[in-house]
Image (spheres, rainbow, N blue to C red):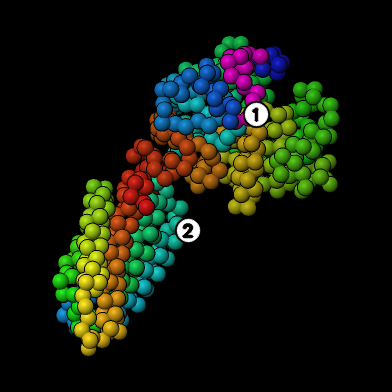
Amino acid sequence: MTQSDMTDDGRIETTTEGDSGSADPEHGDEELIETGVTAGLEENESQTFDGRTIIESRGLDVYYGDEQALQDVSFEIPEKSVTAIIGPSGCGKSTFLRCINRMNDLIQNARVEGELRFEGKNVYDDDVDPVALRRRIGMVFQEPNPFPKSIYDNVAYGLRLQDRTDDLDEKVEQALKNAALWDEVKDRLDESGLELSGGQQQRLCIARAIAVDPDVILMDEPASALDPVATSQIEDLIQDIAEEYTVVIVTHNMQQAARISDRTAVFLTGGELVEYDDTDKVFQNPESQRVEDYITGKFG
Amino acid sequence: MARESYQEKLDQLRSDVLYMSEVVLDRLRKGLEALDSKDEDLAWAVIDGDDEVNQMYLDLEQQCIDLLALQQPVASDLRFIAASFKIITDLERIADLATNLGDYTLQAERDVFPEVDVQSIGRFTVEMVEEAMEAYANEDPEACRYVANRDDELDGKCERASQLVVRDLIETELDDGADVEVLLTDVSRLLLTIRDLERVGDHAVNIAARTLYMVENSDELIY
């Protein structure tokens, strides 16, 4: 399956009912009421979505063998924003993240029930090619993992794989600029990516992820292995790229979630989504006492 | 219970704010008493005691800043610290107004307009501050609203008292031998006393408003 196949699959519902290509959030707001993707909005009026829904989880259950990792998780992630997922270890937050681009397929005994919709299309439908899906939903991991190749080749890797080599130099430069790394590496693009510092390596991985121009970038603890300065660079970068891309970030660092995200989802033990709301609301006045106890450190 | 040291610091802040309020209330009561009994020693005690209140205020301000900087409080903890940070400012201002009462005591040589019941107004403001601090201690939203409602009553009392003084001045023909300058000073002081007590009530409402924010995340009473 090619990327355009996936695009057709994924966009049919949204492009016909609401202008999914609209870059104008003001108009997008009015149109989103009509889209099939956002029908679930009416069920929970307390949440305020100011962007079109791009990812929607509906009654998602995930099991690893007999153990249930996610329980009936339902929420909607708006496009071009930062959504943070927080919660104690083992609450299923990384599991959820890995459902979005079907990384859990790689775990042998993982079983997914319910729906995880991307652009209105359930990514677990039989006709969805996970490889094509991952081209549109990139991922950045906790440990920076550049390929043992040059800086240039790291960024160009995905583009070459997709035969999108027209204007390759420009695309690499733009991706490195978008990842706030260009000025630091422009004179040594042929050096190995592994020569860079940890923070630079992580920004290189972000450049590699955005070079193929995905819609969504998933980040699993992207700054937890970095020092405070490199962490703030990554945080600034996340907020910048959220103007163009949808970022979903799993973090153990609650202050990081508070600093950079527009919306926060709190998963608690048992794989349950306990609260999902605007980030300022969650950190100033959470609805749930369990969330209050977790974020104030009274348990967990 | 996790974060024990943090919890202890929050408890410490709460008890220190309540202690400061007791000291401030004591100063307010003594200021009123000094005014009533023309007790200059008591007046001086209130005035000299203001440094102690100012120091308490600065210490508590630092406690709040330390908690914000070092503990990254969120949710109800954040609202508690933010509210306390504002409330200690109101308490410090109430103490300043109490020292004004001490100053007025020292300046006053005689009572003018004894029919104006400053003590009754004063007791009313003391009650409002007491009730606001009880609301804070007990995290009681209804008590916050009660304090806010009482402010209208206080404002009415103060307005009537001021009008009584002004009306009387307009209607009174002064004797030829009357010392206008002394009378002017006395009357101005009385009007300032009424205004200061009215402000104590405003600070009590501020405390209630911040407490309601702390308890219910509501800005209902904030201005």
Residue at image point 46% right, 21% down? A40
Q: Residue at x 73, y 44 (%)?
A: A181
The three-letter amino acid code for the residue at tag 1 is Ala
Residue A291, position as x, y percentages in the image: 38, 39
Q: Main secondary structure of the magenta part?
A: helix
Of B23 and A142, which appears nearest the observer? B23
Which residue matches tag 2?
A: B69
In percent of the image, x 53 and y 29: which residue is there? A77
Which residue, given by chain and number where applicable, does mark 1 sit on? A23
Q: Relative to residue A106, is residue B117 drawn left or right?
A: left
Point out the frontmost of discs 2 and 1.
Answer: 1
Q: Quadrant of residue A241?
A: top right
Query: In the displayed structure, would residue B13 be above or below residue A179?
Result: below
Q: CA distance from mark 2 to mark 1?
A: 39 Å
Badge 1: residue crowd in 10 Å (few <14, some 14–19, many ≥20): few
Image coords of residue A1 (percent x, y): 69, 13
Q: Residue furthest top?
A: A127
Q: Nearer the viewer, residue B24 or A59?
A: B24
Hey, which quadrant is residue A277 in on the image?
A: top left
- Does the rendering let one see residue B199? yes
Question: Left of B58 or right of it: where is B15?
Answer: left
Residue furthest bottom in the image:
B177
Per the image, label 2 sits on a secondary structure element best described as helix
Q: Is residue B180 left or right of residue A281?
A: left
Q: Residues within 10 Å of mark 2 (few under 14, many from 20)?
A: few
Task: Tell me which segment is drawn in magenta.
Answer: A8-25
